[in-house]
Image: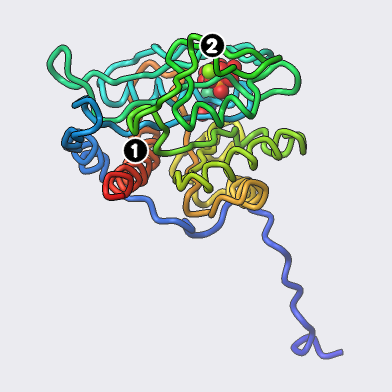
Amino acid sequence: MNWMFQKREVKPSSSPLLDKEWRPVPWNAKAEYLQFVRGFEPFQPHNDEKNEEQCIRILLHGPTGHGKSSFINSVDTILQGRMTGRALADTIVGNSFTKKYTTYKITKGAHGTFYPFVFNDTMGLEKDKGVLEEDIKLAMMGHVKDGYTFNPHSTLSTDDLYYNRNPSLNDKAHVLVCVVSAARVHLLSQELMTNMRNVRREASDLGIPQMAILTNIDVACPEVDANLRNVYKSKFVKRQMEVLSASLGIPLNCIFPVKNYHSEIAPNDDLEMLILMALKQMIHFGEDFVNDCKCT
Ligand SMILES: Nc1nc2c(ncn2[C@@H]2O[C@H](COP(=O)(O)OP(=O)(O)OP(=O)(O)O)[C@@H](O)[C@H]2O)c(=O)[nH]1
Ligand SMILES: [Mg+2]
């Protein structure tokens, strides 16, 4: 056969990276994003809300040890401009480290003022040892008071001191964020996925917007570990986002891959850019939800 007419074999690309980012990231816009977060105005007090200042409540949930508390610490670190570790994170993955339902406010500038958004950290989901799906739903509806220690064996009962019978808009969650490690999406049991999907469905019924963050992108993909700017080029990270989207029913554009601060002692602009992208979306979602609730 004439060599000129021989078909050239096209080998599948074995590179773990795509040629181009599939989602553009404004890598040099950290200052703009920070300015947005810093300038985000508190809501006007609502007449029938006991005149308490309305803020956005961001509720984090997800499997044990996937980076919920670390995400709160990362946001705190970025906004304080120094390493913080208020939402204690654990280095030994086993039983859930976070056991109490805790609200984290972030100090803004002068002593005594806070950003108009708060995070609620929850105990991790885990078979027999983690938080119960029902308790996450109760927290979402504002029925769980701050400081409640989750019990893996029984749901918070209506006669418990920590049960809030009449939650105000401020007590309810305004954004539900599912936190999953990119390195462990494939290890999640069907049961856990079902728990998370059920929580999400309940949020949908209540009209609460939902998002997911995919942590540990540095652990999941060596190319991302070497350079965080490869995150939207990494085929592996993209696949994990797609799997999570399909399993939980969260659209891909509501899933944000991040790396949390965990061992660093110096600030990292690329890490902060990814976290700020996720945070900005949480604020937008929460603001829309609160405004809609106030209008109805
Ligand atoms: N390399 C890396 N480590 C992370 C990341 N996020 C969290 N970690 C580490 O993962 C471990 C568990 O993180 P936590 O923030 O305690 O996880 P959690 O979801 O709050 O866990 P529970 O409270 O037990 O449910 C800690 O050692 C963190 O430092 C990340 O993005 N990259
Ligand atoms: Mg925790």
Tell me which label, 1 or 2, sits earlier in the chain: 2
Point out residue 66 in the picture as x, y percentages from the top left corner.
59, 26
On the picture, is 246 further left or further right than 163? right
Q: Assign a secondary structure to mark 2.
A: loop
Label disc, if present, on residue 296 of the rendered structure: none
Q: Which residue is mark 1?
A: 276
Which residue is at 59% across, 45% downward?
201
Q: Three-letter amino acid code at disc 2?
A: Asp
Q: Assign a secondary structure to mark 1.
A: helix
Which residue is at 40% across, 56% downward?
24
Point out residue 274 in the picture as x, y percentages from the top left corner.
40, 39
Label disc, if present, on residue 160 of the rendered structure: 2
Which residue is at 52% across, 21% downward?
122
On the picture, is 137 further left or further right than 243? left
Q: Mark 1 against mark 2, which lies toward the viewer? A: 2
Q: Three-letter amino acid code at disc 1?
A: Leu
Q: Which colour style is shown?
A: rainbow
